[in-house]
Structures are given as C-alpha cells and as structure tokens.
Amino acid sequence: MKKMDRSLGRLVPPGISAGREIVAMAGGLLLAVMLSLRAPLETALRFRELSELYRLGIPVEPDWGQAHILRAMTGFPVLALLLAGLAVWHLVYFRLGSRADYLMRRLPDRLELARRCAALPLAGIGAALVISALIYLACRAYDMHRLNMALRLLRELRGE
C-alpha cells in the first residue's frame, strides 16, 4: 500500500491516502456492478417462468420491455455523483486549515491543483462508464438471445 501511495500520491491532496481512495472506489464499482446484475437476473428468472407456463399450454403475455436495461444502469449514475462529490471534497480539503490552494496556484505547473482534485474521481467515473457500457452490451445480447428463444418456443407450440 505504501508503494501505491507514493506513486499515486501526486493525484490526491497531501495527507490523503491514494490507496484507500482507490480501494473505496473499487468497492463502489463492485457495488454498482452487483446492483446492475440484479435486474437482468430477475428478468431471466421471469422469462424462465413464462417459458415453463408456455410449455404447459397456459397463455401468458411476456414483457418485452427494455426496462431491465435501464434498471441495470442505476448504480453507475449514483457512483458518478458520489465521485463528483469526492472531487469537490478534495477542493474543499485544500481550502481548509492552512489554505494550501494558494500555494498550489503559485506552483510552476498551474494544473497541479486541478490534477490533485479531479484525477482519481475522473478515473473512477471513466471506469464506471466502461463497465456500464459492457453491462449494457451484455444486456442487449441477452435480449437478442431471449427473443430468439421465445420465437423458437412459439414455433414449437404452433407445430412448425
């Protein structure tokens, strides 16, 4: 953890552990992924129940909506808002106590303050965007698979 803190120490305000922030962001990403996987799993279980009812000859209208994809993405906007709040907290941290923001503005690298305040939160938001795009593509692929399964099941019931 100490090596990570030294190498990433330039990306956070002084006195804050970069390793702890990265672990907290990874935990937030894991929680968002778990929230996201809940919706497609519920839809898969519902589709399985409907297909069993179809096989028994009970007419049921399946839900072909895309609502599970929208529900799958709910964890990521919340995580992005929390990470944006973290960037604001980093800026406030510089303004507390010794007012280190004045010193940061006088450094030769004018972007040092912005880098230390926003680097890790922006990296976390980028990771959340990539993971949410992968989950979205997986949900779309599952929808196509589910539609093909339903069409095959209907053909079986009609005797085609």
Image: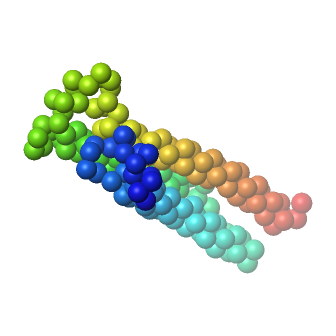
* Quarter of the figure that contains the C terminus: bottom right
x and y, in percent, of residue 125 in the image:
43, 43
> Which one is nearer the viewer's eye here, 122 or 111?
111
Residue shown at 28%/43% (left/top)? 13
State the quadrant of the N terminus.
bottom left
Q: Spot the residue most to the right.
A: 160
Residue 2 place in picture, x, y as percent: 41, 57
- Residue 48 picture quarter: bottom right
Q: In this view, does 143 lie above or below 154?
A: above
- Farthest bottom residue in view: 56
Residue at 19%, 44% (x, y): give it.
Answer: 93
Q: Coloured how?
A: rainbow
Image vertical order of residue 141 relative to residue 54, above or below: above
135 left or right of 11? right
Nearest the eye: 107 or 113:
107
Q: Evaluate whether residue 75 shows in this view.
A: no
Percent x, y for residue 84?
Answer: 32, 42
Nearer to us in this view, 91 or 147: 91
Residue 132 higher or lower than 160, as above or below: above
* Residue 73 position (above or below residue 117): below
Residue 150 visible to an observer of this rendering? yes
What residue appears at the point 73 percent right and 60 percent down from the top-left corner?
150
> Which residue is depicted at the point 39% across and 51% down?
5
Q: In this view, does 16 lie to the left or right of 9?
A: left
Image-based side of 16 in relation to 98, left or right: right
Left or right: residue 147 compared with residue 33: right
Question: How many numbered marks, from 0 up?
Answer: 0
